[in-house]
Amino acid sequence: MQLLYFAWVRERVGVGEEQVAPPAEVATVADLVAWLATRSDGHAAAFAEPARLRAAVDQAFVPLDTPIAGAREVAIFPPVTGG
C-alpha cells in the first residue's frame, strides 16, 4: 500500500510517501493511523492526535473509520483550509 503524507504530517514523519504492508488486523484508516504511530518517533508525533487528521483512500475523501481492504493508496493530511 502506498501512503502519501501532506503538510505538517509529511514534515513530522520526515517523508512525503512510503510503501507499507500493514498487518491483517489493520482494517480501517483509524487502525492504520494507530499502527503507523508505532513506526518511529516522527510517525508518533504526526499521528498523536488522529482527530486532527483527514484521509483519502484511492483519491476519494473518507472518514477515518473507512475500511482499507484492497486500497492501493492512502493519503493522510491535516484539514484543508481556504485562503
Image (cartoon, rainbow, N blue to C red):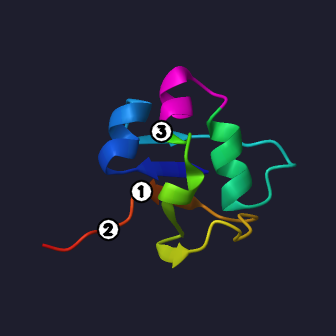
Q: Is residue 56 left or right of residue 36?
A: left
Quadrant of the rendered image containing residue 20 = top right
Give how far across and how far down residue 28 sits, in percent.
Answer: 74, 61
**Residue carrying label 2:** 80
Amino acid at pointer 3: Ala
Element at label 3: helix
Residue contact between numbered discs 2 and 1, judged by CB atoms under 8 Å: yes
Residue occupying the point 49% across, 76% down: 61
How far apart are the alpha carbons under marks 3 and 2? 16 Å
Amino acid at pointer 1: Phe
Amino acid at pointer 2: Val
**Residue carrying label 3:** 46
Give how far across and how far down residue 81 sits, in percent.
Answer: 26, 69
Element at label 1: strand
Q: Looking at the image, which is closer to me, 17 or 51? A: 51
Q: Is residue 1 above or below residue 21?
A: below
How far apart are the alpha carbons under marks 2 and 1? 8 Å
Looking at marks 3 and 1 on the same chain, the residue that comes earlier in the sequence is marked by: 3
Q: Residue furthest right?
A: 25
Q: Is residue 23 above or below residue 29?
A: above
Residue occupying the point 33% across, 36% down: 11
Per the rendered image, the range of residues in magenta is 38-45
Q: Looking at the image, which is closer to me, 62 or 47? A: 47
Number of numbered labels in the structure image: 3
**Residue carrying label 1:** 77
Residue 59 in sight: yes
Residue occupying the point 48% across, 55% down: 76
Callout 2 crowding tier (Cα within 10 Å): few <14, some 14–19, many ≥20: few
